[in-house]
Amino acid sequence: MSEPRTARSASAHFATSDSLSAYWRFYWAVADAQLARWLPEEPGRILDLSGPDFRGAPRAVADGHDVVTLLPSTELRPRRQLTLVNGHVPAARRRSPGRLHPVIGDTTFLSGFASGAFDCVVADNRVLSRHLATEASLGEIARVLRPGGQVLLCVDSVVLGMALLAEQDCWPELSSAPSADVLLVPWPDGSITRCFTAEQVAEVVADVGLELEWVRPRTVLSASTVELMLARDSQALGRLVEMELRAAESDDNVGVHLLASARKPAMDALPKPR
């Protein structure tokens, strides 16, 4: 008789993106499919701020885009993208691949890049939650985007923040978390991340002059559900990814991470000087 499965804490699930665990294999497969759907049809120049753990840069390069990816050190390189062999994740479009340009730099301040230099910016892997002054970072993203350019971002949700606070017995903070203007949550490892509701994502996007296109949970299925289903059927990964992609209009009050897309207004939509 097998031993009963024990539920892991929120910090145990989400403190590190262990690519070998069942949940994170599922998570990155969903992220890969979401990025494939979001990428523009025409090849362009993309700035990737998501860090070396992000698997999306090779996906964009294979799709024909030139990608500048910011890394914290020369020892780190983007990992190979996670793909499914059963065809459930959209394949890269058939065109010549683009180029990948690793650059050492700070993802908070993009002073090394000219204004309007990029067609798209990808700020995945919760990078803007680690930048506690998210407005400043998003303002820099808006600056380097060309008019009409897009940004894809992923942040920690208030759902995750409340789970972490409860796990650490921070009950006074937990009681005020849903109504807080800014929710900063300590992790057991000493780090701090900023957590958002969908409304707060919309506010910070609008504050820097970008237009929100949509915001939704990255995943709706819980980590425990995914791990249970994959333990029962190792071939269920593709079906689980399809379930997530169909949940585009899901309640944004579920899910530990929020994914959003925003666009910089085109030149003809900008206010004219008086």
Image: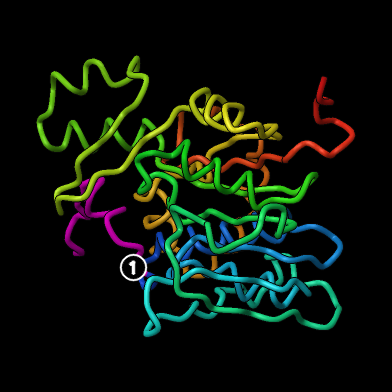
> Which secondary structure dominates the residues rendered in magenta?
loop
Q: Position of residue 264 (x, y in %)?
A: 73, 40
Segment tinted magenta in the rendering: 1-18
Quarter of the rendering containing residue 16: bottom left
- Name the residue located 55 percent from the left edge and 47 percent from the top edge: 140
How many numbered marks does the figure carry? 1
Tag 1 secondary structure: loop
In this picture, residue 140 sits left or right of residue 155: right
* Observer able to see residue 270: yes
254 left or right of 122? left
Does the magenta segment cover residue 206?
Answer: no
- The percent position of residue 172, horizontal first and vertical second, equals 13, 18
Q: Quadrant of residue 45?
A: bottom right
Q: Tag 1: Cα neighbours inside 10 Å, few (<14), some, or many (≥20)?
A: few
Question: In the image, is residue 160 above or below residue 197?
Answer: below
Q: Say which amino acid is labelled 1.
A: Asp
User: Residue sitting at 10 percent across and 30 percent down?
Assistant: 169
In what quadrant of the picture does the N terminus appear?
A: bottom left
Q: Is residue 181 left or right of residue 151?
A: left
Q: Residue at x 71, y 35 (%)?
A: 213
Picture coordinates of residue 170, whole percent (x, y): 12, 28
**Residue at the right extreme of this rendering:** 268
Return the residue at label 1.
18
How is colour applied across the structure in the image?
Answer: rainbow
**In the rendered image, which quarter contains the C terminus?**
top right
Instruction: Return the x and y of residue 263 as percentages of the image width and height.
Output: 72, 40
Q: Nearer the viewer, residue 123 or 84?
A: 123
